[in-house]
Image (spheres, helix red, strand yellow):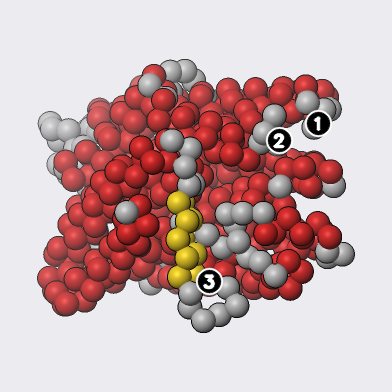
Amino acid sequence: MIAQQIIFILALPLIGVAALIILGKKHSDHYGGIITTATCGLILAIASLIYPYINQAQAMKYQIDIGLPTTFSIYLDAMGYLMLVVIAFLWFVASWYSIEYMKKEHDQSRFHIFSLFSLFGMLGMVVSGNLFSLYIFFEIMSILSYFLVIHEESPRAMQAGAKYLFMGIIGGLILLGAIIMTYLETHSLDLSGSGLSLIHESPYFTWIFWAYIFGFAVKAGMFPVHVWLPEAHPIAPTPASVLLSAVMIKAGAYGIIRTIYAIYGPAMVMGHSFNYIILVVAVITMILGSIAALAQTELKRLLAYSSIAQIGYVILGATLLSKEGLMGSVLHIFNHAMMKGVLFMVAGAIAYQTGIKNIKDMKGISRKMPLTMLIFTIAVCSIIGFPPFVGFTSKWFLALGALSSAQSKIISSTSSLIIIGSLILSSILNVIYFGPIVINGWFGHNEDEGGEDSPPDRLHHGHLPKKASRTIDPGWNMLLPMLILAVGIILFAIFPEFPLGLARLVAGSYIHL
């Protein structure tokens, strides 16, 4: 029964694509957002029915013989299920948001078609039971999401898309090489059993390991292969930016976690000190992403660099090789999706309503967009790590993970203190680049406000309206998805049983201490 539900989940995005094609461009432009939202809502509903099965610490495996040396395998465990929920939830709210936002964009039907294709790739990747099917879905997501990046078709969009596609192809080819070598050395691609344990006998196991890490790190946006991300995420339409930053970069993090814990195993990674190298890169990613964000003047570009920093948290937790560290990593996948999703939505709502994209023009924005600014403030407090917001929860577990790893002699006590210090430093940097936006948004005064001779309305030209007596928060199709995520940021911090329970299941399945 569970297998049929998962197959139906996989089929739903393709059914949505077929419906949009049958409707034709005119009707798909009008109803595309509704159809995509309904598709994602149905996926989320079906995923909720699977939770009791996963909560019993069970995993589901289903194989289909396709006449190749390896089978097409579906496998769902706690890690895959958490990713499935994050994907379905964020795609649902982003698609709902797009109903209003995309009205001003051209080729809406094309956007929704490639959104559903990208969703198909993401879903397939996290329910794949072997490396062959994982790679196929990973490439579907990587290549077809290119059309979301270049949707505006401006020179800047095409340039960003070219860099995104080039880096994705390079990463994909290296990943394919690692998978081929894995099969040649182990005669298995199975992610759900112990068939890959023979890889430690291969003379090439070090090269294969780093090929996996590199291939997935490109998609995750880790330093130093992050160069595509600050260009691609800001230029895409906001609903696509939400998906790229809150969901799709997690595909790379998911792949790295599977590499460490399912392909190689914590003992092998620890025994060869692979984790120390990735730990260093994760900390560098975390700090440099935040430092680069300090220099940004455009809000969406600042958020893109912030995403680089935040993915550093996820990789950091995964490489601590402790239960608490892995729990922090998994929790941050869940929490960051909500935080960064709503921050990009707010940036898009401000641009949609006022034309403002630069941070300096956001002074006093709360007087015209109070609800939008309140939502932004909640997300900022969370991403900094203030309680009672979800960002605090995952950072707390990452700090505990560093201490636990030191106690277990996985890392040194000095290393654990450096990691905790880096977490604090990153939070301070978050305060430095987000704090002025919040303060100026609530208490600042835009130089273009006021004046008797001012035009009555300058919406969509980069300035606040001067004499409008009403608020200009976006319509409910944009506001409600933002509110849902903002409520989630608070609710899952106060009542963390669902994400915390899944994080415990993930850590318990991989680390037996």
**N-terminal-most mark, 1 or 3:** 3
- Marks 2 and 3, how far apart at CA: 33 Å
Helix, strand or loop status at disc 1:
loop
51 shown above or below 4: above
**N-terminal-most mark, 2 or 1:** 2
Horizontally, is 357 left or right of 98 in the view? right
Residue 431: quadrant of the picture: top right
Amino acid type shown at disc 1: Ile
Where residue 481 appears, x then y in whole percent?
26, 41
- Residue shown at the point (38%, 45%) measured from the top left: 85
Helix, strand or loop status at disc 2:
loop
The label on residue 411 is: 1
- Residue shown at the point (25%, 30%) measured from the top left: 371
271 shown above or below 130: above
Q: Quick check: can you spot residue 395?
A: yes
Where residue 387 appears, x then y in whole percent?
47, 18
Helix, strand or loop status at disc 3:
loop
Amino acid type shown at disc 2: Leu
Asked if marks 2 and 1 touch (Cβ < 8 Å), the reply is yes
Of the pair 5 and 481, the residue shown nearer to us: 5
Q: Which residue is mark 2?
A: 320
Q: Which residue is mark 3?
A: 71
Asked if marks 2 and 3 touch (Cβ < 8 Å), the reply is no
